[in-house]
Amino acid sequence: MGVPYCTRESVKAAVDVKNTAAANAQIDRLIESAARNIERLCHRVFWPWTGTRYFDWPDQSSPTSWRLWLAQNELISLTAVTAAGDAVLLADVLLEPSNDGPPYNRVELDRSGTGSWTSGDTPQRNIGLTGVYAGAPVEERPVAALAEALDASETLVDVTDGSLLGVGSLLRVDSERLLVTDRRPLTLGVTLAAELDDQRNAVTLTLSASTGAIQPGEVLLIDGERMQVVDSTGTTCTVTRAADGSTLATHLVGAIVYSYRTLVVARGAAGTTAAAHDTAAPIVEWVPPGPVQALAVAEVLNSIAQENSAYVRVVGTGEGQRNASGAGLADVRSQVYDGYGRKARTGAV
């Protein structure tokens, strides 16, 4: 399973899709399709993968036998090197281009050092490079902390803040990466202290305790209605009502307030190993390149519109009616390809 380049929530924010199992399944399927299409378009995988990849022994008759081209296996960082099963000192290996990377598209032996590529019994899969692979610089941002300790097998993870997270987020706790596959409501330990009418202009929640832990951007669940937090101070929250396609309703004093802070995750994602983590361990999220995120959302929105129209989507009326051209989407694709597409061989001497 690959990693998405946008979240379910970012797509829903664009069209305010009603939160149903069918809609979520459609969006998740189209997000996966968009991600793999972007990778085919650019001949590049953007998300970070940790592990060992193997390469054939360079031709010793080549004038640059000390250089190993990585093709589509671009490196961000390197932690171990082997040749014919023997360790090569990292100090004897150079990542190139040193001035432009990461990502790095080749490794070279330091010709002033003692390292060498040895062939062993066969030149095939002879050199092993262990590190982080990605087709673009790896950017991460802090998003929350663990609200509980984790063992190496738990797949339901409680976090301290749900405002920046979504289904499809690739997270890192210590050295382990986790892929968010769903979110569930978690009680915040507070209730409504004043009745809330079923009016869209009734946007102030009065709660039974301080709302200092509730963050702008979080989605709250009260009875069956979802509300997005605009601001939070003291015992009050300002919200946008009937968010995420939910239904506006009246809520009585004592109604329990939930936030989507329980994450359903795939452990040991992107080549990492599942491990135990302590309470309050910081969580960071991998951030895809901005244009790639924008294209992913655009591809999903286009696919939703096409599927909902049985792929006969038209614009205009009467004699002016015509098939939708998708020119705007084509422009976004072109910008991503121009900026990130691999357009030529990288293995030239």
Image (cartoon, rainbow, N blue to C red):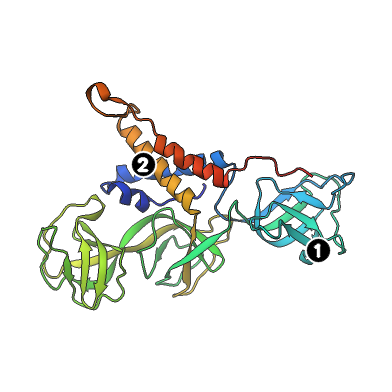
Q: Which mark is residue 92?
A: 1
Task: Quote the CA–CA distance across marks 2 and 1.
Answer: 49 Å
In this rendering, would 89 be left or right of 49? right
Query: Residue 215, located in which quarter of the rendered image?
Result: bottom left
What amino acid type should be assigned to the residue bearing mark 1? Asp
Asked if residue 29 shows in the view, the reply is no
290 sits to left or right of 198? right
What is the number of callouts on the image?
A: 2
178 or 247: which is nearer to us?
A: 247
Judged left or right of residue 240, residue 79 is right
Residue placed under numbered mark 2 in the picture: 301
- Answer above or below: position of 295 versus 185: above
Residue drawn at x 47%, y 65% as measured from the top left: 141
The image position of residue 98, as x and y in percent, is 71, 60
Residue 325 screen position, x and y as percent: 38, 30
Numbered tag placed on residue 101 in the rendering: none
